[in-house]
Image (cartoon, rainbow, N blue to C red):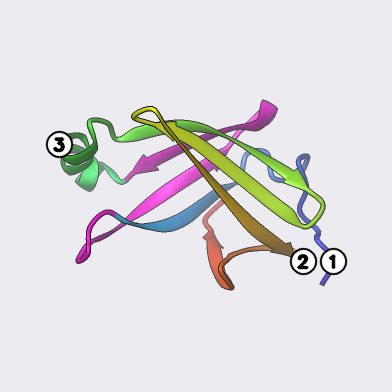
Amino acid sequence: EPPLLNESNLVGTSWMVNVPVSNSMVVPVTITLSAGGQAVATVSPQLASLAIQMLGTDKLVGTWSVNGAKFIASVNFKGKDYKVECDISGDKIYYQNKEIKRIS
């Protein structure tokens, strides 16, 4: 399906990503896409103190962009760069063939 999402209509949207933080624990993270390619990842208030304890923060700021049918997000955390490429199909985004849930 051709991509219906782009850098214009993704601004202001939020997506739920399950991030593995250990072998036994997955934390739901909300990623909000802002204008100018800024992405802000936050955990729910219930998990904020745990995130601060484990990671030193409950919020990460990164970047995002669209290149055709690819959605690219990146963040620098503790001096290391992390980059994720996802596939856009229609109005959905997939990471490793799993749909990422849109929440707004």
What residue sits right under mark 2 in the picture?
A: 90
Identity, as a three-letter code, of the amino acid under mark 3: Gln
Q: Which mark is residue 53?
A: 3
Neighbour tally class for label 2: few under 14, some 14-19, many 20 plus, Cα within 10 Å: few
Three-letter residue code for mark 2: Gly
User: CB under 8 Å between callouts 2 and 1?
Assistant: yes
The answer to whether mark 2 and mark 3 are in CB contact below 8 A is no
Kindly indicate the quadrant of the structure image that contains residue 98.
bottom right
Secondary structure of the residue carrying tag 2 is loop
Instruction: State whether residue 2 is above or below residue 16.
Output: below
Q: Is residue 35 left or right of residue 24?
A: right
The secondary structure making up most of the magenta span is strand
Q: Which residue is mark 1?
A: 2
Whether residue 89 appears in magenta in the rendering, the answer is no
| Residues at marks 1 and 3 touching, judged by CB atoms closer than 8 Å | no
> Residue 63: where, in percent of width, then height?
58, 33
Give the residue at x 69% y 40%: 65
Segment tinted magenta in the rendering: 21-43
